Image: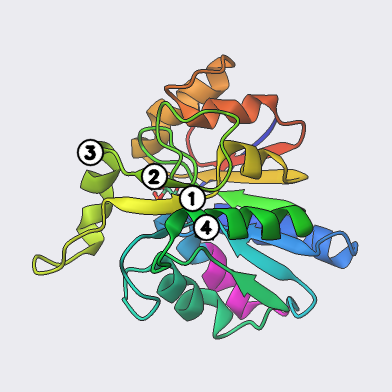
Amino acid sequence: MQTIVVESKEQGAEKIVELVREELEAGSLNVLGLATGSTMEPVYEKMVASDLDFTSVTAFNLDEYVGIPATHKNSYAYYMNHLLFNEKPFKETHIENGMAENLEEECVRYETLLKENPLDIQLLGIGENGHIAFNEPGTSPESVTHVVELTESTIAVNSQYFTEDETMPVTALTMGISSIMQAKKLIVAAFGEKKRAALEKLFAGEVSTEWPVTYLLDHPNVVVITDLKL
Ligand code: F6R
């Protein structure tokens, strides 16, 4: 595991874009896994401002809420369209359909697509409770794309984005740990004190189901970018 310590989230975002650029220019980036959340906002801002050309790249997102359409401002589809895809065209973009009638079938469809398009790079943020994508504590390392009930911790953190008259979904679809671990390279970003506990668990070097981020210890090509000095 390689760790890059930066001074700020902005500098971290620049570093992530630089790593993506390296692979893109080397011709080794065909499939890019993307994440949402506040960590990734400056990353997409910098990608949009850059001269990077993603027209030969297929994108897959990690997760999506169940029950809100892509037109809802808090859906991850909306986030991606507005922060990145509307400005930077990709060859194809994929995100789980949280409005699917049969969610189990939707998960199988998504996982099949992932198998057909192996991820070259997967960008990851970390939840305060150590989740990666929406793989909450207790998730099996064997998990593939699945339906998940969000934990109290994740609901408390993410409810800040929903106004009082909106109900935050408590169910989501997410790539599993195994789906994520298939990526050739993982770029993990964690900025700010709220991520300290999760990063400490990762750097302690022991895999624990209670801290899904520690599963990444078993991956051969992980870059962690953080502004925390641990
Ligand atoms: C988002 C995702 C989540 C976030 C994590 C951190 O697609 O999969 O795991 O990366 O919750 O969120 P922020 O960046 O908002 O702190």
Quick one: label 3, few (<14), some, or many (20+) residues within 10 Å? few
Q: Position of residue 178 (x, y in %)?
A: 63, 37
User: In this image, 90 relative to 103: left or right?
Assistant: right
Using the image, determine if residue 86 lies above or below residue 173: below
Dot placed on the residue nearer the N-terminal end, 2 or 1:
2
Please tell me which of labels 3 and 4 falls first in the chain.
4
- Residue 116 in picture, x, y percent from top left: 77, 58
Q: Is residue 27 left or right of residue 69?
A: right
Highlighted magenta segment, given as a residue range: 43-51
Asked if the residue at label 4 sits under 8 Å from ligand 1, the reply is: no
Quadrant in the rendering for residue 195: top left
- The answer to which of marks 2 and 4 sits earlier in the sequence is 4
Q: Mark 3 points at which residue?
A: 152
Q: Is residue 40 visible?
A: yes
Q: What element carries label 2?
A: strand
Q: Is residue 48 magenta?
A: yes
| Residue 78, above or below 199 | below
Please identify the dominant SS of the magenta region: helix
Residue matched to label 4? 105
Mark closest to the chain's N terminus, 1 or 3: 3
Task: Say if mark 2 contacts mark 1, CB within 8 Å.
Answer: yes
